[in-house]
């Protein structure tokens, strides 16, 4: 007993898995419907180090899907990062949680230190910028997204989980980010009303995302190649590797230059500050 | 402050394959990683984006050393460092499992030639890393610091492999 998380039932992950998980560090960008699910699961599996980033406070429209949030939080207007930290610490008090109530672009020094970034953000522009950052510092990025479409009076739920691995196909390679989609999004900017979001598709996508993370950090088998893009059909309730995978290039041509790596404004003077 | 060399699994696999190719007389091969540096909240990151391989004819036949790169070979690396504005990390492979160690000769040679890269890229860190099949150790010379610091290595792929998370030493 005591305050230490007992991970006996997941010992099949390997003899050193508890230590590896304890030393691993993940960033969660966005602590809404998707990110809050991921935070909870990562706490349960024994991740040792969290960086949680979100500039938002909870409001009453979030309670239908934000894991760990309470009616009292809505009344108080609690920051989403504080709810995430509370959930993490309640499961695993030993976990280190760095929380930043900010846009991720204001937290780049800390973000460079993580092993994996979870992108749980709404817009195509934002996930594309975050991927550019992750590639620059050779950090795998796991992106989740869900959508509800309306056509002739009926609704359809879909979504996807993508592993953006440095050197491998990126969101542009996979057609998740296109100039057309970015332009369309920019034109819509500021339009009233949020996109529809519900708890159960987020839970499915978050679980797949955590599964991808576990295969990176403490794989339980090494023979099956994990698909880089998984598609969720919320109407049929299925998740399957994307058909696009068959047509992808082996390597990404969008981020293949030395100039896309590291500090664009490197100066050794900055070293003195770190030491 | 920690120093971490990061490279993709794709680049690493290609590197190891090339380092293991037999040579007519050189006992081992070496290569040079072309990196760009960055600072994080806690670490100096060396982000590898390419490999400068040593051509067969640029090894010199010296029975006292495993691999010796001749003057023309070194000149080519220095030129690459200058032209592409990169940090250079010298790499070679010890073909065993477990934590590798630099030999005395390695340490002496590192101290001689690594700071030479400051002649062409004075503001960048440069280093040397020796890999085993499942681990690595390294040294990095950081501008303004007279003695080298240790280097940890992270191979970014599926699975992720990091020297500081290896639990069997
Ligand atoms: Zn691409």
Image (cartoon, rainbow, N blue to C red):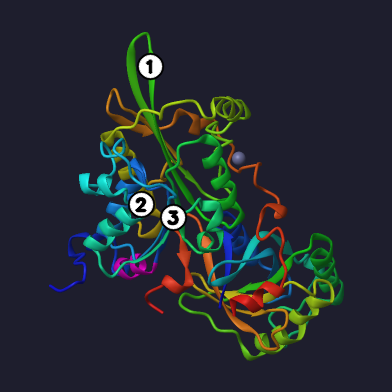
First reached walking from the N terminus: tag 1 or tag 2: 2
C-beta proximity under 8 Å, tags 3 and 2: yes
Q: Helix, strand, or loop for circle 2?
A: loop
What is the chief secondary structure element of the magenta stretch? helix
Q: CA distance from mark 3 to mark 2?
A: 8 Å
The residue labelled by disc 3 is A101
Q: Is residue B60 visible?
A: no
Q: Residue at x 41, y 27 (%)?
A: A193
Residue at far front of view: A75
Q: Which residues are magenta?
A: A17-23
Q: Residue at x 55, y 46 (%)?
A: A131
Q: Is residue A62 visible?
A: yes
Is A180 colored magenta in this rendering? no
The residue labelled by disc 2 is A79
Q: Helix, strand, or loop for circle 1?
A: strand
Mark number displayed over residue B68: none
Nearer mark to the viewer, of 1 and 3: 3
Q: CA distance from mark 1 to mark 3?
A: 34 Å
Question: In this orientation, which residue lies closer to the viewer: B52 or A66?
Answer: A66
Q: Residue at x 86, y 71 (%)?
A: B75
- Same chain shared by disc 1 and disc 3: yes
């Amino acid at each position: 007993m005591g305050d230490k998380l007992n991970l006996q039932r997941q010992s099949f992950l390997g003899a050193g898995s508890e230590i590896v998980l304890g030393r691993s560090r993940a960033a969660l960008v966005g602590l809404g419907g998707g990110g809050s699910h991921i935070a909870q699961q990562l706490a349960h599996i024994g991740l040792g180090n969290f960086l949680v980033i979100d500039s938002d406070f909870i409001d009453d429209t979030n309670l239908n899907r934000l894991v760990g949030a309470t009616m009292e939080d809505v009344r108080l207007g609690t920051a989403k990062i504080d709810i995430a930290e509370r959930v993490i610490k309640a499961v695993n008090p030993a976990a280190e949680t760095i929380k930043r109530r900010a846009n991720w672009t204001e937290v780049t020094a800390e973000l460079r230190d993580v092993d994996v970034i979870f992108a749980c953000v709404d817009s195509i522009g934002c996930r594309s910028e975050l991927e550019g950052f992750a590639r620059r510092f050779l950090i795998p990025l796991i992106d989740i997204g869900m959508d509800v479409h309306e056509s002739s009076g009926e609704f359809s739920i879909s979504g996807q989980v993508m592993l953006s691995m440095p050197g491998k196909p990126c969101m542009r390679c996979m057609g998740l980010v296109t100039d057309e989609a970015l332009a369309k999004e920019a034109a819509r900017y500021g339009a009233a009303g949020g996109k529809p979001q519900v708890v159960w598709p987020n839970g499915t996508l978050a679980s797949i995302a955590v599964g991808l993370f576990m295969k990176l950090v403490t794989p339980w088998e090494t023979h099956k190649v994990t698909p880089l893009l998984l598609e969720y059909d919320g109407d049929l309730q299925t998740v399957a590797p994307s058909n696009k995978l068959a047509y992808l290039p082996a390597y990404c041509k969008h981020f293949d230059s030395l100039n896309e790596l590291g500090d664009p404004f490197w100066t050794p003077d900055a070293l003195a500050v770190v030491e | 402050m920690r120093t971490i060399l990061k490279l993709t699994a794709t680049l690493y696999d290609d590197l190891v394959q090339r380092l293991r190719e037999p040579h007519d007389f050189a006992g081992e091969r070496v290569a040079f990683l072309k990196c760009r540096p960055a600072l994080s909240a806690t670490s100096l990151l060396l982000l590898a984006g390419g490999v400068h391989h040593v051509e067969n004819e640029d090894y010199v036949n010296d029975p006292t050393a495993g691999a010796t790169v001749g003057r023309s070979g070194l000149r080519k690396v220095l030129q690459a460092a200058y032209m592409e504005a990169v940090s250079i990390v010298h790499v070679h492979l010890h073909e065993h499992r477990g934590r590798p160690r630099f030999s005395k000769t390695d340490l002496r040679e590192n101290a001689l030639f690594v700071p030479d890269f400051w002649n062409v890229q004075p503001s960048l860190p440069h280093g040397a890393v020796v890999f085993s099949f499942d681990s690595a150790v390294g040294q990095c010379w950081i501008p303004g610091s007279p003695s080298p610091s240790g280097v940890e290595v992270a191979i970014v792929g599926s699975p992720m492999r990091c020297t500081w998370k290896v639990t069997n030493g």
